[in-house]
Amino acid sequence: MELRQLKYFAAVCETLHYGKAAEKLHIAEQPLSFQIKKLEEELGYSLFIRNKGVRHVELTRQGRA
């Protein structure tokens, strides 16, 4: 787990939107998504519920904890 991943997680939590979080962090959306997915794999559970077709995301129970 890297501090950068936690920073990215916090930005997505604040915006509940990958595109807006990436913009806020001044990075592209793809690296943001990759790092969140990597964090989820390290933790062993999903942090967000992703709505396909809509870029809005919701926190899972584990993500809220």
Image: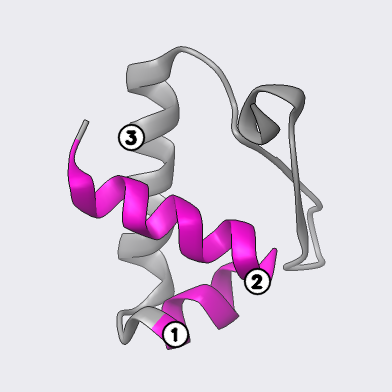
* Magenta-highlighted residues: 2-24
Mark 3 = which residue?
A: 38
What residue is drawn where x is 32% and y is 19%?
A: 42
Q: Give yes or no for contact between labels 2 and 3 (Cβ–Cβ under 8 Å).
A: no
The outermost residue toward the left is: 2
The residue type indicated by label 1 comes to Lys
What separation in Å lies between label 2 and label 3 (alpha carbons)? Answer: 20 Å
Residue 25 at x, y = what percent? 35, 79
Above or below, 16 relative to 9: below
What residue is drawn where x is 55% and y is 17%?
A: 45
| Residue 23 forms part of the magenta stretch | yes
Q: Is 7 left or right of 33, judged from the image as shown?
A: left
Residue 9 at x, y = what percent? 46, 51
Q: Is 20 left or right of 49, judged from the image as shown?
A: left
| Residue 61 forms part of the magenta stretch | no
Above or below, 64 relative to 9: above
Q: Is 3 left or right of 60, judged from the image as shown?
A: left
SS at circle 1:
helix
Closer to the eye: label 2 or 3: 2
SS at circle 2:
helix
Secondary structure that dominates the magenta span: helix
Q: Residues within 10 Å of mark 1 (few under 14, many from 20)?
A: few
Figure quadrant of residue 4: bottom left
Mark 2 = which residue?
A: 15
Q: Which mark is residue 24?
A: 1
